[in-house]
Image (tube, rainbow, N blue to C red):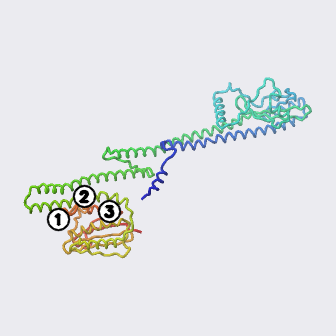
Amino acid sequence: MDSPKNNVRHRDELELRWSARWSLTSRILAVNILALAMLAGSFFWLDSYRIRLLDERLAQTQTEAALIASALDGVGGAERERLAVELGESSRNRIRIYAQEGPLLLDSWALGPPTYEMRDPATEPWKRHVARWMDQAIETVVGAERLPPYPDPAVDTLSEWPSAVAARDGNPESSRLMLAEDRTPMVAAAVRMQDEDGAVLLVTGNARDIRGNVRDERLRLAIIIAIAALISVLLSLFLARTIVRPLRRLALAAQRVRLGRAREVVVPRLPSRRDEIGLLARALSDMSQALRLRIDATEAFAADVAHELKNPLASLHSAVDSLSRVDDPELQRQLLDVIRDDARRLDRLITDIADASRLDAELSRADFEIVDIGRLVETILAAREARGLDGNVKIAFARPRLGAARVLGDESRLARVIGNLLDNAVSFSPENGIVRIGATGDGENVVVTVEDEGPGVPSDIRDEIFLRFHSIRPEKEDFGKHSGLGLAIAKTIVEGHDGTIRVEDRDDSSRGARFVIILPMAS
């Protein structure tokens, strides 16, 4: 039996604290979407990947600026212009040289073709606008650093470029990232040249390829997440369908059983399911059937009780009414005997009915202990002999060796079973007859047998004699001495001990009945 502490612990294990108001479908979807949300966190990694690429491009441009300045130092005139154009085309950068005072001295784009494209967002299709908006939204969500805008000065001078100013002033922070109008990153690096006039070389480049690569990766990741989300939602709905719908059907069936509006409520058994839901469905179906049988048995028992009580009450009522109208002392004595017999019969009926009605509940709460059947039978026989219950009938007991017939059970209830069988055997035995009782163990079960020399039990009613109020009594016995519940009570007690009871013919072909009880042997 579970203790109150275990019941509290089991209840706490089944309780939901923060999600108790959520439906099961919502919980399944939430768990799967949470996993996808963790996958969506890879957007943060993509932003760090973008920043790392830009930092590498910035360092590369700074190195290229230093190399280009070294190549252009000491070269002047047309040779410097030609070399600047070639170096700009090979590095895909724009090369400009500013005088220390600020004027532009050389521009590779003025001498040759542009090495990268500066796009006007107003002339681009709507897809580009959507892409830029998504870039901005993602960078806002991940908290990316905002880059300053890339300048487009009307008069191109050194003061318009913070990198060139920093290089002129000897500041090591002479490179920076900026953002073009179409939101592509721009890289600018400046180096102070070593010639005598202190000119500053500025190298600018467009990192459109980095933006394109990051967009491609984001698109792939978004497609993967979208597909995973779709699959996750479909699987969640499928899982909810396979779990929630049968649970809802079972709940509705249980509700109908509780309301009791239908005599036969069919609880779906879900025989094709071999999972926990199927086990639950079959358990609920079996429980409802057992409950229905219990209700039917209770109703039948109530009807039988009413029927059995009516006979002695009618006889008692008739005797009481007649007593007031009879003057003959002999008739009065006979009526008083009838009243006493009916009262005893009612008392016996009420006692047995009370025992039978509470037997199941008491057995479910009983604490079973080791019971030695051999010693128990000896105790019962000694008590019967002291009270003279057996009359002229002799009882022979084949005592098993000590400990050979031990069971786990309630000793008083098992004594009730054996006592009922002995009462039944003695009542059917002839004068000077012998009732034999035995108890043996075969390693797995303990077998208790009670044999009498009475008329026996016909094979067609051997199951009926264990029904409540079914009574077949010997002719010599006075009417009303038994309630018809003895064998029914015995069967209930035996089955409450996981055992069986039956009646059969005697093995030695002698006249009489043989009752057999089989109980699991205690380990």
Q: Identify the mark nearer the N-term, 1 or 2.
A: 2
Please give the residue where the numbered disc 3 appears in the rendered image.
Answer: 493
Please give the residue where the numbered disc 1 appears in the rendered image.
Answer: 478
Residue flagged by tag 2: what amino acid is it? Answer: Ile
Residue 258 lies, in percent from the top left, at 35, 46
Image point 37% across, 52% down: which residue? 287
In the picture shown, does residue 366 fall above or below 127? below
Image point 8% across, 57% down: which residue? 326
Across the whole image, how many numbered discs are drawn on residues?
Answer: 3
User: Is residue 344 found left or right of 170 in the rendered image?
Assistant: left
Q: Identify the mark nearer the N-term, 1 or 3.
A: 1
The local secondary structure at tag 1 comes to loop
User: Is residue 211 found left or right of 472 in the rendered image?
Assistant: right
Residue flagged by tag 1: what amino acid is it? Answer: Asp
Image point 34% across, 46% down: which residue? 265
How crowded pointer 1 is (Cα within 10 Å; few <14, some 14-19, many 20+) is rated as few
- The outermost residue toward the top is 154
Residue 29 lies, in percent from the top left, at 52, 42
Please give the residue where the numbered disc 2 appears in the rendered image.
Answer: 350
